[in-house]
Image (spheres, rainbow, N blue to C red):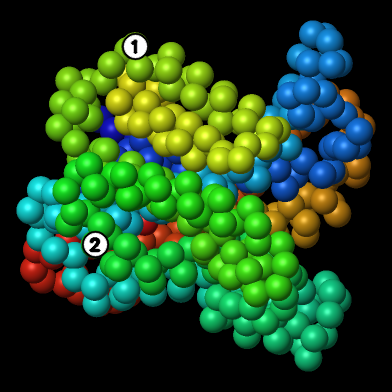
């Protein structure tokens, strides 16, 4: 007999065409999208005078540090975007790595781009058009004012046309513009997997360091346009995902996973995840954060306890619909929750931590559940990367899934 959780979660299971599925990755997607949602809700609850950085928390004393620790973590929720970038680098490069390293069928570039177009573009078009309608309905500008932003968003080029500004119609679209640029680069970048192991891994590590160094001096002139308005400024995270794809296919990690994972890796992974967020508050000539995050990801794939946690079906279900949550959570926050629920239904006292953290979690849960219904209509019909009324393509070609 099928249990009620299985019936409830059945529509939210990953649909892949490649047969190569890492459920922990959907668990990590859940972590990333929940961080982003909490971060965008956070402004309703924070005074921005609370201690937020590690030095501030240490200076505030043990009691205050524990009180404001939830605020400090939630205020780092923007880093969920970088986690998404690593996941994209991993997932999109994995079929190419498997072809070069394990002799699996070569991904067809034509099918790769067709899947990207349908899988990503259709829900994005719906979300952008819906957001335009909301902007016009709520009087944040007339059609003549909003149409240029809408048109620039359609071609994923708002940053270019509007000097790096976020799209006022759909603020979160700036990350999708970078993702699309990376999608275009993947078939070329993945040629690195044809190199010998030491050379390709050394090249990827060197590229991560070089991107970080070049991006740090990108605040003026043409360099600002190149490094801050394009994927190049965030490329280090995508490259870490590619390096993780290489490591995930190694005999070492494959053997560990075949044996159910290693318990002793879990502690290393927990320390790595904590360290990633601590390092946000410190500046380095060459930041170690991408490599610490790479270690944290690796420990999720290799750890027994961490792996089991991120494979939890409730977490992976949220991860499956993370794209829909990402596209529509701003609507629920700023059109429904902000104007109609906060203060009117739920009293809010800014700076009241950790109590506000519980309210934030409840609101995030409401948003995720609401987005679940949107996912079934907007995203799931296109999740296989083909139009729902078209038959499945024949052949054994491998194509990456999001």
SS type, badge 1 = helix
Residue 59 shows up from this direction: yes
Crowd rating for badge 1 (residues with CA inside 10 Å; few <14, some 14–19, many 20+): few
> Above or below — where is 349 with respect to 90?
above
Q: Is residue 44 left or right of residue 333?
A: right
Residue 23 at x, y = what percent?
33, 38
Which quarter of the figure is the C terminus placed in? Answer: bottom left
Q: Are marks 1 and 2 in contact (CB under 8 Å)?
A: no
Q: Earlier in the sequence, mark 1 or mark 2?
A: 2
Q: Residue at x 56, y 68 (%)?
A: 230
Q: Residue at x 26, y 20 (%)?
A: 261
> Above or below — where is 283 with respect to 59?
below
Residue receiving disc 1: 264
Please identify the quarter of the rendering in which residue 221 is found: bottom right
SS type, badge 2 = helix
Distance CA(mark 1)–CA(mark 2): 34 Å
Residue receiving disc 2: 191
Q: Give the camera-side residue of 401 and 273.
A: 273
Q: Residue at x 46, y 68 (%)?
A: 180
Please identify the quarter of the rendering in which residue 157 is found: bottom right
Which quarter of the figure is the N terminus placed in? Answer: top left
> Above or below — where is 390 with respect to 316?
below
């Amino acid at each position: 007999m099928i249990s009620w959780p299985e019936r409830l979660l059945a529509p939210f299971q990953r649909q892949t065409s490649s047969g190569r599925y890492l459920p922990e990755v959907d668990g990590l997607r859940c972590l990333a999208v929940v961080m982003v949602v909490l971060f965008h809700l956070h402004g309703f609850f924070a005074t921005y005078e609370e201690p937020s950085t590690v030095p501030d928390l240490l200076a505030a004393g043990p009691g205050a540090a524990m009180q404001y620790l939830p605020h400090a973590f939630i205020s780092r929720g923007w880093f969920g975007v970088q986690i998404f970038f690593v996941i994209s680098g991993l997932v999109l490069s994995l079929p190419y790595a498997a072809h070069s390293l394990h002799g699996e069928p070569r991904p067809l570039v034509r099918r790769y781009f067709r899947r990207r177009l349908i899988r990503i573009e259709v829900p994005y078009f719906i979300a952008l058009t819906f957001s335009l309608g909301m902007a016009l309905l709520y009087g944040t500008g007339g059609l003549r004012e909003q149409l240029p932003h809408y048109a620039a968003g359609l071609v994923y080029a708002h940053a270019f046309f509007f000097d790096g500004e976020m799209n006022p119609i759909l603020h979160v679209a700036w990350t999708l513009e970078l993702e699309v640029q990376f999608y275009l680069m993947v078939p070329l970048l993945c040629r690195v997997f044809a190199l010998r192991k030491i050379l390709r891994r050394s090249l990827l590590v060197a590229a991560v360091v070089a991107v970080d160094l070049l991006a740090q001096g990108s605040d003026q002139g043409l360099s600002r346009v190149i490094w801050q308005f394009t994927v190049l400024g965030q490329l280090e995270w995508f490259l870490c995902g590619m390096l993780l794809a290489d490591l995930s296919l190694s005999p070492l990690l494959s053997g560990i996973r075949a044996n159910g994972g290693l318990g002793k890796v879990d502690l290393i992974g927990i320390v790595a995840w904590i360290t990633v967020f601590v390092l946000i508050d410190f500046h380095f000539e060459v930041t170690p954060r991408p490599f610490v995050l790479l270690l944290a990801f690796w420990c999720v794939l290799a750890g027994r306890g961490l792996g089991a946690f991120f494979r939890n079906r409730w977490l992976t279900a949220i991860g499956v619909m993370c794209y829909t949550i990402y596209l529509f959570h701003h609507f629920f926050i700023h059109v429904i929750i902000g104007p109609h629920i906060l203060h009117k239904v739920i009293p809010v006292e800014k700076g009241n931590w950790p109590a506000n953290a519980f309210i934030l979690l409840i609101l995030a849960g409401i948003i995720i559940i609401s987005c679940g219904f949107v996912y079934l209509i907007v995203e799931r019909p296109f999740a296989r990367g083909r139009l729902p009324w078209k038959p499945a393509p024949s052949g054994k070609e491998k194509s990456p899934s999001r």
